[in-house]
Image (cartoon, rainbow, N blue to C red):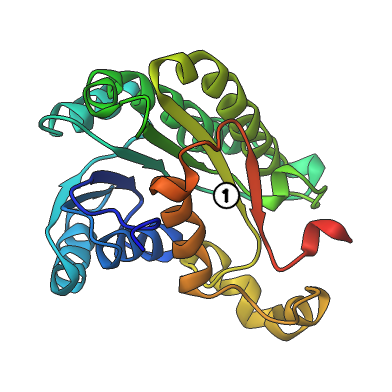
Amino acid sequence: MNLFSLEGKTALVTGGTRGIGLMIARGFLQAGAAQVVISSRKADAVDAAVKELSEFGEVVGVPADVSTEAECVRLASAVEGPLNILVNNAGATWGAPLEEFPASAWDKVVDLNLKAPFYLTRALLPNLRAAATPDDPARVINIGSIDGIMTPGQRYSYTTSKAGVHQLSRVLAKELGPESITVNAVAPGPFESKMMAATLDAFGDVIADTVPLKRIGRADDMAGVAVFLASRAGSYVNGVVIPVDGGLTTL
C-alpha cells in the first residue's frame, strides 16, 4: 500500500519551524519525502528546526520573510528543480477591539496570510509545472483557518485574510487544474502552536470541551490531512477547503 507514500517527492513548507508547519514538514518526511525545504523569518529558528527534523530525512532551511513579494521571489529562487508540493503556511494574527483596531493590523496580517500565498505560488509555478503530470499533479496546500468559516470576534484582519485564502485556493484550483496542479486549503481548528499558545493556556479546557471530539488537535491530525492531499490518495482532490477541527464548524 503506497497510496499515502511521498517517496521521491520534494516539498516546501513556509512557516515550517514551529506549530502547524513543523507538524506538516515532519509528516512529509515520515511519509518518505525525498527532501523538505522549510522557511521562516528567523534564521536561528530555521537552524533549530532543521536539526530537529533531520532525523526523519533530508531537510533544507531557507530563512525568508514572505510578507513581501521580493522575499517570496528570493525564496522561490532557492528551490532547485521540480517542486511536487508547496505548503503556504506562514501566518500572523492580531486581536483588538473594533474601535482600536489599527491599520497596521490589516497590513501585517493580509500581507503575510493572503498576499504571500499568491506571490509564492506564482513565483514557483515553473518548479510546480516541472513536477506536474496528469497522473500525479503537483500540489499547492494553503493553510486557512476555521476563523475564515466561522465568525470569531476582534480578529478582523485575520478572519478576513483566511476567508480570502479559501477563496484564492478555489480560484487557483480552477486556473491551474488544467496544468495538473491542484490547489486546496486546510482550515485548522485549535492546535497547539505559538499563535494559539496564550489562548490555550487560558482557555484550553473550555475550548476542548466545546469541540465535538472533546480535545485539541494533535500533530498527527494535521500531518495526516497534508499527507493525504500531497499523496496519490489526494490526486483527484482540487479546489476544496477541509476543516480539521474535531467538528467545531458543525456547531
Q: Is residue 239 found left or right of 141 in the rendered image?
A: right
Q: For the residue carrying disc 1, how many other residues have a C-alpha within 10 Å: few (<14), some (14-19), or many (20+)? A: some
Q: Residue furthest right?
A: 251
Q: In which quarter of the image is residue 22?
A: bottom left
Q: Nearer the viewer, residue 136 or 61?
A: 136
For the question of whether residue 89 can be seen, the reply is no
Expressed as whole percent of the image width and height from the top left, the position of residue 35 reads 16, 51
On the image, numbered disc 1 is attached to which residue?
Answer: 93
Q: Is residue 1 found left or right of 32 in the rendered image?
A: right
Q: How many marks?
A: 1
Q: Is residue 86 found left or right of 205 in the rendered image?
A: left
Q: In which quarter of the image is the C terminus?
A: bottom right
Expressed as whole percent of the image width and height from the top left, the position of residue 14 reads 34, 46
Expressed as whole percent of the image width and height from the top left, the position of residue 195 reads 52, 62
Q: In which quarter of the image is the N terminus?
A: bottom left
Q: Which of 155 and 227 is in front in this view?
A: 227
Residue depicted at 60% across the width and 31% down the height: 239
Q: Where is 60 relative to 183, above or below?
A: below
Q: Which residue lies furthest to the bottom in this view?
A: 205
